[in-house]
Image (cartoon, grey):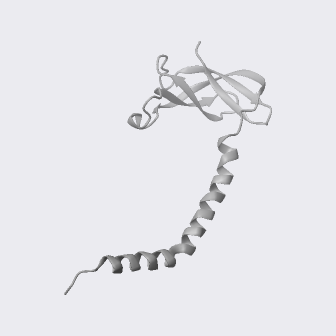
Amino acid sequence: MMGPTNLSRRNRLLLLREEFRGRVVGITILCAFAFAIAVPIVTRQNSPIIGTQRVGGIVEDVATMPLNPKGSVGHGLYYRYEVRLHDGNALVFVDGEVETPHMIGSEVSIEQQHRKNGTTTYRLLND
């Protein structure tokens, strides 16, 4: 029995190409649609800050970020704090520098930033 020839391999590749041509076009269109939706979200400009307020809170949890330091070569490590605010008991996430750690249960000062687009962001103040 003889093995497949170069001609038969070529014919199989042509058959596979014809069989999956419609699927490739569909997947390409789907990826282009997802890309078109993602671009405005990724390139969204920050809305300007229109007001700030100093609030306090208690650190409830701390995580080192990024979770996999090897996957972020060239980026610095930082802490992500889970802070429960005193006013309203809201739970927010705030990033902080490694040089100034805060223990779980400690009091921290946070700047609440109100932005033009209606969102609210938080920044850890190093007092």
User: Residue 24's x, y, as percent?
Assistant: 54, 68
Q: Is residue 26 above or below residue 112?
A: below
User: Residue 89's x, y, as percent?
Assistant: 65, 33
* Left or right of residue 70, residue 126 in this image: right
Q: Quadrant of the N terminus?
A: bottom left
Query: Farthest residue in the front direction?
Result: 7
User: Residue 123's x, y, as percent?
Assistant: 63, 24
User: Residue 116's x, y, as percent?
Assistant: 80, 32
* Left or right of residue 53, residue 5 in this image: left
Looking at the image, which is closer to me, 32 or 11?
11
Query: Farthest residue in the left direction?
Result: 1
Q: Which residue is painted at 44% across and 34% down in the image?
A: 72
Query: Farthest residue in the bottom direction?
Result: 1
Q: Quadrant of residue 54?
A: top right
Looking at the image, which is closer to me, 7 or 99?
7
* Left or right of residue 47, residue 124 in this image: left
Q: Quadrant of the C terminus?
A: top right
Q: Which residue is painted at 49% across and 21% down in the image?
A: 102
Q: Is residue 6 above or below residue 42?
A: below
* Left or right of residue 66, residue 112 in this image: right
Q: Quadrant of residue 25?
A: bottom right
Q: Which residue is painted at 66% across and 59% down in the image?
A: 33
Q: Which residue is painted at 60% across and 59% down in the image?
A: 31
Question: How many circles with numbers are drawn on the protein?
Answer: 0
Looking at the image, which is closer to me, 6 or 32?
6
